[in-house]
Image (spheres, rainbow, N blue to C red):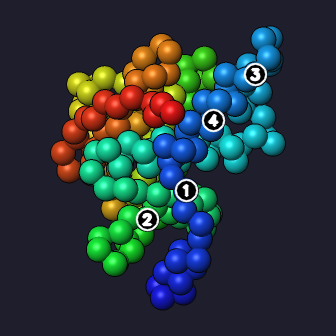
């Protein structure tokens, strides 16, 4: 554990609001007619950028939900994709986060949140401090999410986040789905 903490202390943590504002600038600068696969960061070469944007969205939502200045760093290990960090006085607190996506209905109409959670429960049965963040790339409603049973799995917490407006200006974060599902709606950072 000390080796893991020392590794995390050496990472460069990013301000999620700044990262998201930079992504928005890039989105707005794309020429008309650019391939939607490229614009949505769906090519293999852009996967890391897509996951970075999703990590920034989740971390930004968590910052607002918790009232803490939470930063993130991309670093992958066996059970996480990025690490968040916030300070409590002089103490740095770290949380590893596993990022998953429920793809859009256009990409896979048969994909479902219960199926995704069931597969993750099988893959990650051992208790850990890792938080699961699921990007719902098809929107969501609180009553629908409350009806989803979270199976027993090794993640410390389970959170969902998604876009809730057609212009991608409003987002929501829901969690912890393992205890009591609460929702926070927030605006994409402007700047």
User: What is the spatial separation of the Cα atoms under label 4 and label 2, in whole angstroms?
Assistant: 21 Å
- The answer to whether marks 3 and 4 mark residues whose Cβ atoms lie closer than 8 Å is no
| Nearer to me, 72 or 38 | 72
- The answer to whether marks 3 and 2 mark residues whose Cβ atoms lie closer than 8 Å is no
In percent of the image, x 59 and y 71: which residue is there?
A: 11
Give the percent coordinates (x, y) of residue 102. Answer: 51, 34
| Nearer to me, 116 or 61 | 61
Q: Residue furthest left?
A: 180
User: Mark 3 vs mark 1: which is more N-terminal?
Assistant: 1
Check disc 2 and report the residue beneath it.
Answer: 85
User: What is the spatial separation of the Cα atoms under label 3 and label 1, in whole angstroms?
Assistant: 24 Å
User: What is the spatial separation of the Cα atoms under label 1 and label 2, in whole angstroms?
Assistant: 9 Å
In percent of the image, x 25 and y 35: which residue is there?
A: 183
Give the percent coordinates (x, y) of residue 120. Answer: 47, 51
User: What is the spatial separation of the Cα atoms under label 3 and label 2, in whole angstroms?
Assistant: 32 Å
User: What is the spatial separation of the Cα atoms under label 3 and label 4, in whole angstroms?
Assistant: 11 Å
Check disc 4 and report the residue beneath it.
Answer: 23
Label 1 secondary element: loop
| Disc 1 crowd, CA 10 A, few/some/many (<14, 14-19, 20+) | some
Q: Which mark identifies residue 123?
A: none
In percent of the image, x 73 and y 23: which residue is there?
A: 29
Q: Is residue 71 above or below residue 48?
A: below
Label 3 secondary element: loop
User: Mark 1 vs mark 2: which is more N-terminal?
Assistant: 1
Check disc 3 and report the residue beneath it.
Answer: 30
Check disc 1 and report the residue beneath it.
Answer: 14
- The answer to whether marks 3 and 1 mark residues whose Cβ atoms lie closer than 8 Å is no
Residue 87 in view: yes
Residue 175 placement, left or right of 169: left
């Amino acid at each position: 554990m000390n080796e893991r903490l020392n590794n995390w202390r050496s990472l460069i943590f990013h301000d999620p609001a700044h990262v998201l504002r930079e992504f928005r600038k890039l989105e707005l600068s794309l020429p008309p007619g650019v391939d939607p696969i490229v614009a949505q960061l769906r090519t293999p070469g852009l996967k890391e950028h897509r996951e970075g944007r999703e990590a920034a969205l989740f971390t930004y939502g968590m910052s607002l939900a918790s009232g803490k200045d939470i930063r993130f760093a991309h670093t992958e290990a066996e059970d996480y994709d990025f690490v968040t960090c916030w300070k409590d006085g002089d103490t740095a607190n770290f949380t590893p986060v596993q990022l998953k996506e429920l793809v859009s209905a256009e990409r896979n109409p048969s994909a479902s949140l219960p199926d995704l959670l069931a597969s993750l429960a099988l893959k990650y049965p051992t208790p850990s401090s890792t938080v699961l963040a699921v990007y719902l790339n098809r929107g969501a409603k609180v009553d629908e999410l409350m009806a989803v049973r979270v199976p027993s799995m090794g993640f410390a917490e389970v959170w969902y986040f998604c876009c809730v407006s057609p212009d991608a200006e409003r987002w929501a974060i829901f969690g912890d789905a393992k205890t009591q599902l609460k929702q926070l709606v927030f605006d994409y950072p402007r700047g």
